Structure formats: C-alpha cells, structure tokens
Image (cartoon, grey):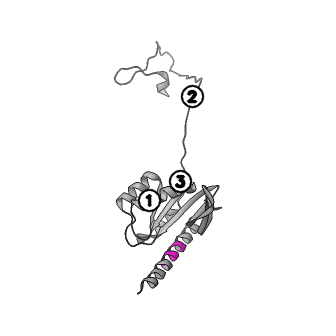
Amino acid sequence: MKGSARLRMAKKQWKLMEQQVERIERLIAQEGSDVTWNDKVPDPDNPRQPRQIDITIRRDGHLTIVECRTEKSPQDVTWIEQLMGRRQSLRADSVIAVSASKFTKGAIRKAEANGIILRNLANLSDSEIKDWGKACEASLVYYEFRDTRLNLTLPQGTEVGTPSYTKKDGTSVLWRGLF
C-alpha cells in the first residue's frame, strides 16, 4: 500500500473512531446535553481562530472536550500535557482523552493528577461503557450547635455533684468536644 493510500485509510479509521465515541457519549449524556462531533470552538484569546475539537459536550454552561487518538502505540504523557494546555486555552471544564490503544503509566499518573479522564477503546467492555456515563453526587452534612441546652434526666434519688467529663486517660473533655 502506497503512502497516500495508507494515509487515507488512517484518516478513515480516525473519523470512524471519533464518530463511534460521539455515539457513545450521546447515549450516556445527561438529558439536556449537546454532543457535537468535529466541533469548532472559538479560541477565547483569538475568537477569529476556531479550534477543531473531536467531540464537545455542552450542558448547563459547562464545556467538556473529548479528544481521540487511533495510534497503535500507548499514548504518553506528552499528549496528556497537550490536553491540559488545550483545556486551559479553551477554558473547558473537563477533558476526556480516548485512545484506541492503551496509555503509558506516566500518562495515567499525569492524567489522574490533573483531572484528565482517560478512556481506552482497546479493551472496552459493556460495563465500562455504562461506567462512562455514571453520574455521582456527593453530599456534605455539617452540623453546628449554638446556644444548646442539654437536659439530663436521672433516676429519682440520684445524688449529683459537680459533673466532670474526662477521657479514658483522665484528661478533661471540653463541653464542645462532646458534640
């Protein structure tokens, strides 16, 4: 196969992969999301220069960019660093890197440290596809007591002196420490 034919074949595989990932993202996207393949995003620093993004996901004013690679060798830290720069440059909220092959250990560490989501099509299973779209929710519960009154009811006839509260080692416990 000649060089130009090989290049056309590689471009075709690349487009098919992007479109496949776009379909998956569309299936798992939350309601109200806008998933676009081969999107053109204006560069905030140079609005006349649109940037090509493989896939964008927009929802509630948030932008996620998805970039895909079809190379046979594992993707390395260099690509992850490029995506970090792209996220910053386009002021995207998140980045998803999808590889047709695997990622190097360095790329995985860099991505984890910098919030880049990695997806590997080399060993994609049905359960992994389902996990891609799982939303998670975290709740923080904080209690604060002010002007609190504690009433203790003791059996009749119990003699009560001045109460003191201590830890097992005999050190005092402050009232605030009880709550």
- Residue 63 point in image, percent of width and height: 59, 58
Specify few, some or many for label 3: CA neighbours under 10 Å numbering under 14, 14-19, or 20 or more.
Answer: few
Say whether disc 3 or disc 2 marks the residue closer to the N-terminus. 3
Of the residues shown, which amino acid type is indicated by label 1?
Ile
How many residues crowd around disc 1 within 10 Å: few (fewer than 14), some, or many (20 or more)?
many
**Picture coordinates of residue 101 (x, y %)?**
40, 70
Per the model, the C-alpha gap separating discs 3 and 1 is: 12 Å
Residue 151's place in the image compared with 108, above or below, is above
Mark 3 or 1, nearer chain start = 1
- Residue 150 position, x and y percent, is 55, 23
Crowding at dot 2, Cα within 10 Å, few <14 / some 14-19 / many 20+, comes out as few
Image-quadrant location for residue 167: top left
**Residue where numbered disc 1 is placed:** 80
Which residue, given by chain and number where applicable, does mark 3 sit on?
88
Between residue 149 and residue 175, name the one nearer to us.
175
- Report the front residue among 12 and 135: 12
Badge count:
3
Q: Is 43 situated above or below 164?
A: below
133 falls in the magenta region: no
- Which disc, if any, is residue 145? 2
Overall secondary structure of the magenta stretch?
helix
Is 17 located above or below residue 41 in the figure?
below
